[in-house]
């Protein structure tokens, strides 16, 4: 399965990774690479927990990622 991961710089240092399709699935790391590695582990653990509880796995099928630019005065 594939999931979108949003990666942003932390307020003080490092990077924070969130998985929008999986509420509460958040990870972090000192570097971009570390944050993505940790996010992959968090994602796998999240999915395993859903499966163990017999819950459906959210998918991103049919979703589209779009970036919009807004002019601010």
Image (tube, helix red, strand yellow):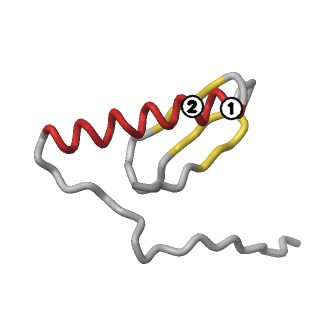
Farthest residue to the left: give it.
54
Q: Secondary structure at mark 1?
A: helix
* Residue drawn at point x = 78 percent, y = 73 percent: 69
Residue of label 2: 37
Residue at x 57% of width, y 31% of height: 37
Looking at the picture, tell me which residue is in the foreground, 52 or 23.
Answer: 52
| Residue lying at the far front of the rendered structure | 1
* Residue 35: percent from left, percent from top: 61, 31
Q: Secondary structure at mark 2?
A: helix
Q: Position of residue 52 (x, y in %)?
A: 15, 38
Q: In terms of depth relative to the viewer, which is nearer, 71 or 50?
A: 50
The residue under the point 30% across, 43% down is 47
As drawn, the label of residue 56 is: none
Residue 38: x %, y % from top left: 53, 29
Judged from this view, the residue extending furthest toward the right is 73
Q: Determine whether label 2 and label 1 are within 8 Å by CB.
A: yes
Name the one closer to the observer, 20 or 56. 56
Residue 1 point in image, percent of width and height: 39, 55
How many marks overall? 2
Callout 2: few (<14), some (14-19), or many (20+) C-alpha neighbours within 10 Å? some
Left or right relative to 5: residue 47: left
* The C terminus lies in quadrant: bottom right
Tell me the crowding category of disc 1: few under 14, some 14 to 19, or many 20 or more residues within 10 angstroms, Cα based. Answer: few
Q: In the image, is 69 to the left or to the right of 30?
A: right
Location of residue 49 (image quadrant): top left
* 41 on left or right of 51: right
Q: Is residue 6 left or right of residue 3?
A: right
The residue singled out by tag 1 in the image is 33
Task: Look at the picture and state if 40 lies above or below 3.
Answer: above
């Amino acid at each position: 399965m594939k999931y979108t991961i949003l990666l942003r710089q932390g307020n003080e240092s490092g990077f924070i990774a969130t998985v929008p399709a999986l509420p509460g699935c958040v990870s972090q790391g000192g570097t971009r690479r570390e944050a993505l590695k940790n996010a992959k582990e968090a994602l796998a653990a999240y999915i395993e927990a859903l499966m163990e509880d017999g819950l459906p796995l959210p998918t991103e099928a049919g979703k589209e990622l779009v970036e919009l630019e807004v002019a601010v005065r």
